[in-house]
Amino acid sequence: MTVDEFLVWAEGRPGRYELVDGEVFAMSPERVRHAEVKASAYLALRSALTLTNLPCRALPDGMSLRIDRTTIFEPDALVYCGARADPDAIEITNAVIVVEVVSPSTASVDSGRKLAGYFSLASVAHYLMIDPVKRVVIHHRRGTEGQIMTRIATEGTLDLAPPGLTLPVADLFADLPPPADPAA
């Protein structure tokens, strides 16, 4: 199936799906922890953007990124820059930051196929993989000469330039209760 055929097939269909190499995959129901971190990521990106004059917008899940003719992903959050997207669009073509919240069932896809797919898009400068259980962010960013640089962060801030954002790691976990005290 091509992406264009998939988009026609998926419209109005209950549930959420992604297309990978022409094959349709249903997206599993989410746990509360996953949904909370996904919401925190979107809100953190949106808040960081409000502190700038950048012509960028943060969007929650629901938007799709076409990777190629037979693959389209739906990240958990994203930031795009430039002209405002058509209000009726279901695809974003110029994502700069892409976020996936990792779960046990998606970790290998998020760190393999999606990592390669997102960075195959010229506009993508940053890919954040957020692990809500370990409270860690794996920040992949586009370097020079096609290199992908990786930083693993549990605290501090993320430098998301381009487009020019600074994002506190703690903000990505703002909706989670404090971690249990291991000494208790």
Image (cartoon, helix red, strand yellow):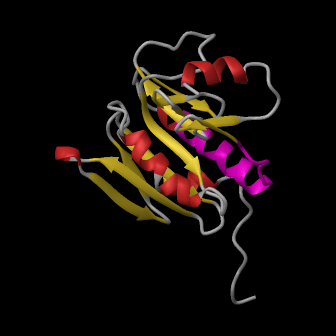
55 or 64: nearer the viewer: 64
- The residue under the point 60% across, 69% down is 134
Whether residue 135 appears in magenta in the rendering, the answer is no
Numbered disc total: 0
Residue 42: say if magenta.
yes
Report x, y in % for residue 135: 59, 65
Q: Quadrant of the N terminus?
A: top right
Q: Residue at x 74, y 56 (%)?
A: 33
**Magenta residue span:** 26-46
Residue at the right extreme? Answer: 14
Placement of the C terminus among the 4 image quadrants: bottom right
Residue found at the very far left of the displayed protein: 145
| 15 w.r.t. 171: above or below | above
Q: Is residue 69 above or below residue 83?
A: below
Q: Residue at x 73, y 48 (%)?
A: 35
Query: Toward which corner of the image does residue 104 lie, by quadrant?
Result: bottom right
Please provide percent x and percent y for residue 59: 58, 29
Decide if residue 13 is on the left or right side of residue 56.
right
Question: Magenta region, mostly helix, strand or loop?
Answer: helix
- Relative horizontal placement of residue 12, taking residue 171 as reference (left or right): right
Is the residue 111 above or below the residue 117 in the image?
below
Above or below — where is 75 with respect to 94? below
Q: Hey, which quadrant is residue 118 in on the image?
A: top left
Residue drawn at (37%, 41%) of the image: 119
Q: Is residue 108 left or right of residue 11?
A: left
- The image position of residue 23, as x and y in percent, is 61, 38
